[in-house]
Image: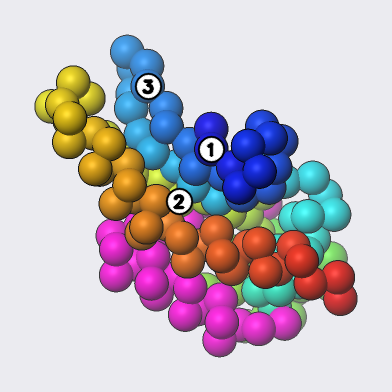
Amino acid sequence: VLTRSGAKNDSGVLYFHLSPEECFFAAGFHRPDPDELARLRAAAARSPKAFRAMTAKLKSAGLSLSAEEKLKRAPRGYEAIDDHTVGAAIRLKSMVCLRPVAEAAILSPALVDAFCAFARDALPLLNWGWDALADRR
């Protein structure tokens, strides 16, 4: 886990997972505390254009927000959002993107380059989230 301050519990992380079952890179805001999740959701709802721009940058890099953990319906106060991209994100419990690591890359010097490329590709999500968390509205 890499964070801006180096503290493990910082919001907004770059993560490298290596196990016999799977290997992947991840970035974003995994299971943020309720206050942080509320601020991320509010930022997406308040500025859907900025949120869509961030997700478009992710998409152009072959990334998207993971929908593995999501609510069945929008949380209270967000039911009326009709923007599909924002509405889907509001239901997420985490705002993260993932990229699988090819088995051949694991034992290769190219692994570091692949991780750096992923970090650059995921930076729009991290910057958006850090800005959202800094906004105390």
Q: Is residue 46 above or below residue 136?
A: below
Which residue position holds label 3? 18
Image point (68%, 47%), residue name: 11
Whole-Å distance between the Cαs marked 1 and 3?
15 Å
Q: Secondary structure at mark 1?
A: loop
Viewer-proximal residue, 69 or 9?
9
Q: Is residue 50 magenta?
A: yes
Q: Mark 3 or mark 2, which is nearer to you?
A: 3
3 or 2: tag closer to the N-terminus: 3
Q: Mark number for residue 2?
A: 1
Q: Note whether residue 103 is visible.
A: no
Residue 97 numbered tag: 2
Q: Mark 2 or 1 closer to N-term?
A: 1
Q: Residue furthest top?
A: 20
Q: Is residue 82 magenta?
A: no
Q: Which three-letter amino acid code belongs to the residue tagged 1? A: Leu
Image position, residue 88 (x, y; %): 57, 66
In-front residue for pair 112/19: 112
From the top left corner, tell me how far across and down residue 121 is, in percent.
36, 59
- Mark 2 and mark 1: span between their CA atoms? 15 Å
* Amino acid at circle 2: Cys
- Please report the bounds of the magenta region as a residue range: 46-71
Q: Are marks 3 and 2 in contact (CB under 8 Å)?
A: no
Residue at horizontal 39%, vertical 75%?
56
Q: Are marks 2 and 1 in contact (CB under 8 Å)?
A: no
